[in-house]
Image (spheres, rainbow, N blue to C red):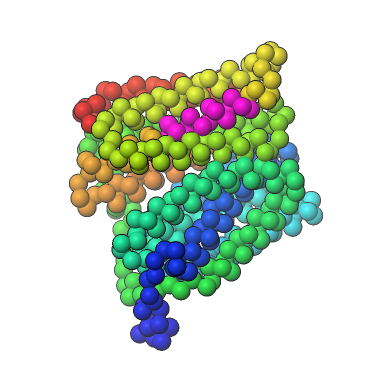
Amino acid sequence: MDMETAIETVIEKKPIHRNINFILLILGGFVSQAGDSIHAIALTWWVLEKIGTGAAIGTLLIFSYLPSAIIGPVAGVYVDKLNKKHIIVGMDIVRGMLIVWAAYLFFKDALTLPVLMLITALSSICSSFFNPAALSVVPQILDKDELVRGNSLYQSIEHLTGVLGPAIGGILIVIFGIGGVFLINGISFLVSAFSEAFINLPFNPGDRKKSLGLKDVIKDLKEGFSYVYSTKILFGLVTTVAVLNFFSFPLGRIALPILIKNILSLGSEKLGFIFSSASLGALLAAAILIKSGIIRKKSRLIITGVAVTGVCYMLNSTLAVGYRLNILTPQFIFIFLCFSYFFVGVSVSAVNIGMMALAMEIMAEGKRGRVFAFISAVSLGLAPLALGIYGILTDLLPNGVIWFSNGLMIMLGAYSLKYVKGFMDV
């Protein structure tokens, strides 16, 4: 054991409020996650101003989510082997430099869609390594008695960035322009990396002896699929997740920005506030369900949540029509969308919590990691496909048709859960 490792492995784990390592990790995570939210708004707005088509937005977003879908399930395995501090600091440095480069190209009027796709894909890969690394170091710097509080605080920060990030991003675009937002965001990642460099993390080189084989990861995913398929309730839940993600994702990422900018001619801050409304709803639902404790009828919570999501989307289908008929004003539609997405956030959060609670309850010990890896792969894998398809459809079909048809499919997904054997009994 070298001197550096010997020093690191005897680090005193102080309480959260006096644990400088945890505080630096939380601050770094806040900046990184807020940066991702702000960057997503800036990317979408740049495409709308430069090109203005749903296909262009969908194509760019594919490069944002496809790397995570491919690398995400594997990245966690490699994170377990490598020095996590180096990953955390290194990924923030790379992301910061990439986004500063985007700002430089923007100010030189040399930023193109292919270049932005490359920057977005590389940034997505960095996030795939940063997020599991940041989460996995929490037990290394906190005592067991502090883990629940520490993880709760980390998750709360994630929800908080979901509320603040989009709103701040939209406002910053109005004040500083897209190039200014790129520059501020890039610098914030570099500042975050600088602060994270002072985190003192223990590292066990012996971890390198663990298997890193891709075959092992694929084997685990296959085992997860086999187990899910053989457990009818789990299969029903995974199918619901697939339907909800496939039909929800393109609405928020493509149909909504087009409605806000191209149809209503509203500003980026309005889009940011709508996204923040959804995160606020999710945060409120999580707080209520955590306080209430036991969820007695998880099936009812899940079905109701999915159905309410579908209803909200179907109601949104009337907005573009109402505007074109001079019945609804842009400001009324903006307020309506804030309320609509607030309830979507509440519903989706309730569905996620109910599904996780039910899945943990019925899954056999030793299968959970593989099952959750499979669910994550399904969720991430469908996002690029949905974005590609609906990027084209939003240019071919009226905005209201997209909202209504997708909301209807989600409603049918909720109704179909009633016919999953044993589901209504839990």
Seen from this angle, which residue lies furthest bottom?
Answer: 3
Q: Which quarter of the figure is the N terminus placed in?
A: bottom left
* Closer to us: 63 or 256: 256
**Residue 181 visible at all:** yes
Where residue 74 sits: x, y (%)?
A: 40, 56
* Closer to us: 362 or 29: 29
- Is 347 one of the magenta-colored residues? yes
Residue 349, compared with residue 420, is above or below; it is below
Q: Residue at x 52, y 73 (%)?
A: 198
Residue 338, compared with residue 146, is above or below; it is above
Q: Residue at x 39, y 58 (%)?
A: 150
Judge left or right: residue 364 versus residue 262.
left
Q: How many marks?
A: 0
* Closer to us: 9 or 383: 9
The secondary structure that dominates the magenta segment is helix
- Is 4 one of the magenta-colored residues? no
Q: Residue at x 22, y 40 (%)?
A: 362
Instruction: Look at the image and give the residue range highlighted in magenta.
Output: 334-348
Judge left or right: residue 233 versus residue 75.
left
Where residue 418 sits: x, y (%)?
A: 28, 23
Q: Which quarter of the figure is the C terminus placed in?
A: top left
Quarter where residue 394 is shown: top right
Q: Residue at x 59, y 53 (%)?
A: 35
**Residue 246 visible at all:** no
Where residue 298 sits: x, y (%)?
A: 28, 32
Judge left or right: residue 160 versus residue 416.
right
Where residue 80 sits: x, y (%)?
A: 37, 65
